[in-house]
Structures are given as C-alpha cells and as structure tokens.
Image (tube, rainbow, N blue to C red):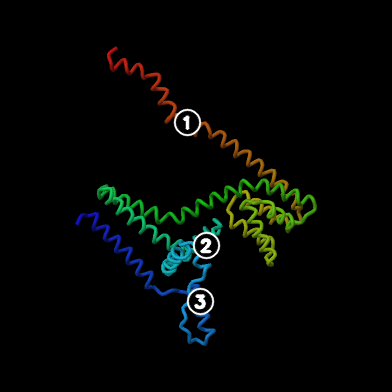
Amino acid sequence: MTPITIVEGIAVIIGVFVLVLVIASPSTSKDRLEQRLYGVDEAMGGSSNIALPASDDEMALPFSERVISPLFNRIGNLMMRNSKAGQIEKLQRLIVQADVEGKSPQMLLGQQIILPIVFVVAAFFLGNYLSLGLPITLAAVAGGVFFGRSLPVSSLKSKIKKRQKLISRALPGVMDLLTISMEAGLSMDMAMNRVAESEQSPLGKEFQKTLDEIRLGRPRLEALTAMSERNPVDELDNFIRAVVQAEPLGVSVANVLRVQSEELRRIRKQRAEEAGHKAPVLMLLPMLLCIFPCVFLVLLGPAIVKIMTGG
C-alpha cells in the first residue's frame, strides 16, 4: 500500500463512521412524515399500521432541503451537546444579521463537520488521480480542512457585509423620505410605513419588520433598538440613537431627521472623495503588470536584438 492509499482508507473510514453515527443516533424530534403517521394512528385509536407516502409538496422540494439540510441539522444537534452557549449565540447572531432564511446554528455546526470531510476525501482522490505526490496531497488536505471548516461562517460574514453596504447606500434616501414625510404632517409610524412600501432594499424590509413588531405591541423605541442590533451599521445606529434620545425629551423628530440626513450626505461625499483619492494608487498595480512590460519591450526590444546578434 502506498502512503496515499492508507490515508485515503482512513478518510473513508472516518466518513463511514460519521454516516453510521448519524443514522444510528436517535432523533430528537419526529420529522414531518412521522408526525403525520402519528396523527393518523391517534385518530384510528392507536392500532393502525398504515404507511402513508410523502406528499406531493414534500417530494417537490429540492434534494438539498429533503436530504442534505436534515443531515446537517441532525449532525448539528449532536454537536450542540458539546458546544458552548456563547458559540451558539454567536452563530445565531450571524444568521440574524445576514437575514438568511432556513439557516440555524445546528445546520452551521453540521456543515462545519461534513464539509471538511468532503473536501478531505476529494483532495485525496484528486491527488491520487493526478499523481501529485504525498506532500502536495497533504497540503491540499490541510487546505480542504481549513476551507471546509471556515466556509459556512465566512459565507455568512460575506452576506452580512454585502447587506450592510446596501443598507448604508440606501440610508440617505430613506432619511430624506422620512424627513419629508414627517414635515408633511405624518407621524413617525406612518413615515416608516411609507419607507417600507417604497423602499425595496434590505433597509425597507427592516423598517417593515420593525413596524410589525410595533403592531404586535412592542414599544417603538425597543423595536428601533432591536433593528439597530440586527444591523450593525454605524450610520443606522447613529440615526436610531438620535431618534431614541429625542422622542422622550420632546425634541422635534423631524428636525433631528433633517440634521441626520445632512450628516449622512456629508459622510457619503467624504467617502466618495476618499475612494477617488485611492483610485490612482489602485490603478498603479495593473499599470505595472500590464502596460509597463509592453512599453519596455517596445523601447528596449530592438536594442536587445542588436546586442544578441552583435550588430
């Protein structure tokens, strides 16, 4: 046996062990099919042995939602027993900030276990197929473990950054709309409703979520504070702090919004100027790699040819 074959065997054994562990582990809760069968059994007096096929709605779901996601959740449930509470809270906070539906801390923990194993097995077989040698294969395996372990969290952080950027870009226009609406005589809730109806960015969805919480009985200041916690954007946090501090003191919220809007415009202009100053520095690298070699070749090419030919 070559060293690569031995390591491949170990990887396959680990994968089989995890699969057997998942299959043999008791489920913490009945799935949808078991719940339906349990309901039928109860309705018939607990004596039925009827097995109902899966519904068309369940079979119409993608394979990832029917098989892969439950597998991740099941492994994640096993991992949660040995996970710290702070780690679970951190994962839940990332899911909320990314506003991703269908994600849970259990699924992320399961992905952090399954994906490294998948990448390790793929690296072994690819290294054996391409005859890369043991050092390169082991380096690929280490990279696969690191990449598979960090991929679930890094993808969430990437979505959070993208979402925060969209919120930051939409905030000046939203502030103007809020200011105009309140100066026209609308209340704060009605102005927020106008923003939620007209704004299609993630910020508009956040205002709609905040309004839903207010309609369910949550105080407005608490709902706004919760929106700030869900979206850690500096400009949005400053706006919500100003509103939260102004309303109990009886200060005109419209005036506060106007000041905040002007401040956001100024910050946006400064960022545009900063990006403009960075442009020449960023353009220098492609010029060095692409343009200057061509210029040197045109200028020095004939001289090099003459030197080599002795002319």
Q: Determine whether 35 is above or below 76 in the image.
A: below
- Which disc is residue 35 wearing? 3
Q: Earlier in the sequence, mark 3 or mark 1?
A: 3
Quadrant in the rendering for residue 3: bottom left
At 28% from the left edge and 50% from the top edge, which residue is drawn? Answer: 129
The residue indicated by pointer 2 is 102
Quadrant in the rendering for residue 189: bottom right
Instruction: Depth check: give the residue in front, 211 or 201.
Output: 201
The residue indicated by pointer 1 is 284
Instruction: Depth check: give the residue in front, 299 or 239.
Output: 299
Q: Earlier in the sequence, mark 2 or mark 3?
A: 3
Left or right of 90: which side holds 139?
left
Name the kind of residue labelled 1 in the image: Leu
Instruction: Tell me the quadrant of the picture where the C terminus can be found.
Output: top left
At 54% from the left edge and 84% from the top edge, which residue is drawn? Answer: 43
Q: Residue placed farthest to the top in the image?
A: 311
Left or right of 151: which side holds 163?
right
Q: Position of residue 149 (x, y in %)?
A: 40, 56
